[in-house]
Every structure is written in C-alpha cells, then in structure tokens.
Image (spheres, grey):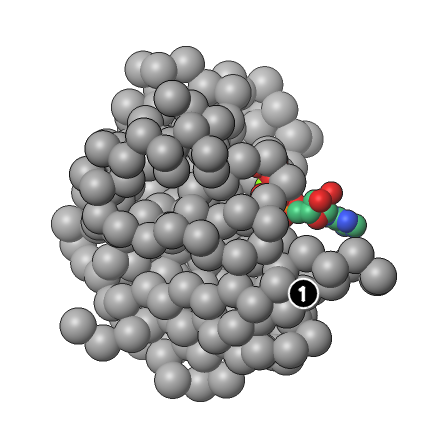
Amino acid sequence: MSTLLNVEDIHTYYGDSYVLQGLSIHVDEGETLGILGRNGMGKTTLINSIMGFVPPRRGAIHFRGEDITTANSFDISKMGIGLCPQGRRVFPTLSVRENLLVAQQEHDVGYRWDFKEVYELFPRLGERAGQRAGSLSGGEQQMLAVGRALMTNPSCLIMDEPSEGLAPMIIQDIGNAIQSLKAEGLAVVLVEQNAAFAVKTVDRVCVITNGKVVYESSPQELWADEDVRRNHLGIG
Ligand SMILES: Nc1ncnc2c1ncn2[C@@H]1O[C@H](COP(=O)(O)OP(=O)(O)OP(=O)(O)O)[C@@H](O)[C@H]1O
Ligand SMILES: [Mg+2]
C-alpha cells in the first residue's frame, strides 16, 4: 500500500505556545486512520498544520509525494485533501444546496461528487435542499459538513470530531457513511474523542498526548489495552 499523506516530525506553535512537539503520522491510500486523544492534546492543531492554516515551524508534510509543508490552504484543498471541520461550520443563512455549491471545485476531467451523489449518500439533505442550513438539526448539519468536504472531490477526507454532540443513532448514520466512503477507496482521517465510535470505524489508531503520538495500534489492540484507555483517553 503506498503512502498518501506523510506527516514527519512536525513542530507547530501558536505564537510562543509549543503545541505539536515532534509529531509523525502517515495515511496509506484507501486507509481509515483514527486519531484519538483527550481535550487540548493537539488533534485540531495537527489538522491546522496539514491544511496550511498553521504551518509547522519544523518538520515536513507530504501529500502524494509532494511537499505541502508551506503550501496554502486553497492549493492543499485542490490537491485532494478535504476537511470536515470541528463544529461543522456550515453557513447558517445559506440553503443546503448553496452550502454545497460554494464548496464545489472546478475539475477538468471526471469527478465523483456533485449534488446528486451527496444526496444519495445523505437522502435527508436532498429532502432539505432548499432549507436554510441554520434550521437543520445537529446531525443534518454534520451530514452537510461532510457533503461540503466531498464536493471538493478529495482523495483524503479529514473529519474533526464528527460525532461531537450527536445522538447515538445519528452517530451510527455518520459511521455508515464513512464505511461506504471507505468501501469506494477514499482515505479517511477520523479525529475523535469518542473512542468507542472510532474503534468501530477505522483500520488503525494513533493516540496523541501533549502534541506527540504516544501509541499506535489496531483498534482491537487499543480497546483491549486498559492502561492506554485510562491514561491517554480518560476512559476505563
Ligand atoms: N488559536 C490558538 N491560539 C493559541 N493556542 C491554541 C489555539 N488553538 C489551540 N490552542 C491550544 O493548543 C492546544 C491544542 O489544542 P487543539 O485544539 O489542537 O486540541 P484538540 O486535541 O483538538 O482538543 P479538542 O478535543 O478539545 O478539540 C491547547 O492547549 C489549546 O489551548
Ligand atoms: Mg479539536
């Protein structure tokens, strides 16, 4: 399996605040990677570094073999990394359809995702295409956030805590959507505090504590390791 995304020993700061302290991860083509860790450990900062929002001061990030360490966010998105941000971030006053439309990227040759395909994945969005996004339920807004990321036609989809604040049945719907994306070969990075959800969904997990990867294994191994669960995830 070839490496799609490679984050090598990155060091990322907010001003003087030293957050990522030599963090490395990789994602293979078609792989689903779970990134776990408690509040404030650096998960979103890792995403901010990958997407070019807060580039690392040291270390390197490669996507499809190209160095994107200092690339801008727009180019990174065009190269095929799609982001479904923490807190959903849909435009509340725009309709569902308009939210999808503004996320769409021009493609010269074939594309996979357009309105029709997003509505097939999430029929509830199709039923509510003309409705203001701000009037959707939390679960529907999360589906829209995933749809917006897909409209960029990514080869790697990064999702930052998609289960946050959602009821178990809706989390299941999001999990099913991830499974079908995975089945068609899309690489997915799933950042989660909900470890129970992540381990059911991904192929491999990394645990981040204090800006470093402190543990990496199969989801089954992680779930069986009480020490890691207690010390690094706060569940026991
Ligand atoms: N814009 C910012 N400016 C300064 N410090 C920040 C900023 N964003 C995050 N931090 C700090 O960086 C550290 C890592 O935050 P980060 O958002 O990456 O954590 P996280 O693992 O995503 O947490 P959560 O699970 O709560 O989303 C925290 O100490 C946080 O307070
Ligand atoms: Mg976060």
Q: Is residue 189 left or right of residue 148?
A: left
Name the image quarter holding residue 111: bottom left
| Residue sticking out furthest to the right | 16
| Residue sticking out furthest to the bottom | 66
Q: In this view, does 163 lie above or below 5?
A: above
> Could you tell me which residue is drawn at 48 percent across and 27 percent down?
234
Q: Position of residue 178 (x, y in %)?
A: 28, 41
Q: Position of residue 120 (x, y in %)?
A: 25, 37
| Kind of residue sitting beneath label 1 | Thr
Is there any visible trace of residue 196 in the rendered image? yes
Q: Is mark 1 on a helix, strand or loop?
A: strand
> Could you tell me which residue is drawn at 41 percent across and 14 percent down?
167
Of the pair 29 and 226, the residue shown nearer to us: 226
Of the pair 122 and 165, the residue shown nearer to us: 165
| Residue sticking out furthest to the front | 227
Q: In this view, does 34 lie above or below 187?
A: above
Name the image quarter holding residue 199: top left
Graded by Cα atoms within 10 Å as few (under 14), some (14 to 19) or many (20 or more), the crowding at tag 1 reads many
Q: Where is residue 168 in the image (x, y as percent from the top left)?
A: 35, 15
Could you tell me which quadrant the N terminus lies in?
A: bottom left
> Could you tell me which residue is drawn at 41 percent across and 73 percent down?
6
Of the pair 176 and 1, the residue shown nearer to us: 1
> Could you tell me which residue is drawn at 38 percent across and 84 percent down?
65
Q: Is residue 69 above or below residue 165?
A: below
Could you tell me which quadrant the C terminus lies in?
A: top left
Where on the image, by quarter, is ligand 2?
top right
Q: Name the residue under label 1.
A: 12
Instruction: Count the numbered circles shown.
Output: 1
Is there any visible trace of residue 126 in the rendered image? no
